[in-house]
Amino acid sequence: MKNKLTTAQLAKLAMMVVLSCVLVLLIRIPFPPAPFLEYDPADIPIYITTFAFGPIAGLLVTLIVSLIQAFMLGGSGVYGFLMHMLATGLFVIVAGCLYRHKKTKKEAVIALVAGVLVTVAAMVVFNYFVTPAFMGVPTKVVVGMLIPVIIPFNILKAGLNAIVTFLVYKRISGFLHKA
């Protein structure tokens, strides 16, 4: 992303925010081992934004979407904002920094896989420290959820969103890069 965003780029970023919010409204699938966790494809437009415009644009869209989801679309308030911002923000930084230098399919795969791995590892740490305070449960309860619930959920969510991003990015990138 250059130092200044053009009006067209701002409009495209806004469109990706709206698309992300629409997706979270339309598709929410409870994760069977822990129905309070829900898969949604709202990160796909964020990942696409990151690949098209870079990690700073991806973080900006993540911030706006996280605020809207957490406080206006039935999210979990401060906890939901914090966890979404951390999980998706880390993915965006890692995948965006890897992909921006060499935009090939191979690099896209490497960037997406690295983003998923960093997200999963980070969410283990963040859940360990943040979830006990939010849910009012002892840390040992969260530790007991790490392997059967938290890790699989984050692999599933970040992994599915990364796969869909890989499959649709090239089709959408032409539109996003048009003047």
Image (cartoon, rainbow, N blue to C red):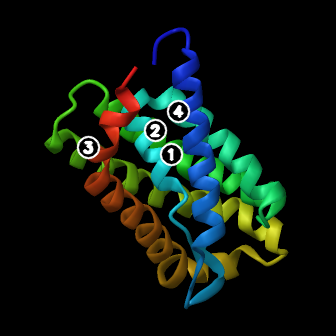
Which is nearer the eye, 159 or 20? Answer: 20
Q: Which residue is mark 1?
A: 46
Going from the N terminus, do you reach mark 2 or mark 3 first? Answer: 2
Residue in the picture at 82% in, 65% down: 133
Residue at image position (69%, 49%) is 66
Sequence-first disc among 3 and 1: 1
Q: What residue is pinned by disc 4?
A: 12
Which residue in the protein does label 2 denote? 49
- Tell me which numbered mark, 1 or 4, is placed earlier along the sequence: 4
Q: Amino acid at mark 4?
A: Lys
Camera-nearest residue between 3 and 85:
3
Q: Position of residue 24 (x, y in %)?
A: 62, 64
Q: Measure the alpha-carbon separation of dots 3 and 1.
A: 15 Å
Say which of 18 and 163 sits in front: 18
Q: What residue sits right under mark 3 in the picture? A: 170
C-alpha distance separating marks 4 and 3: 16 Å
**Disc 2 marks which amino acid?**
Thr
- What amino acid is labelled 3 in the image? Lys
- Percent from the top left, x then y, of residue 130? 73, 60
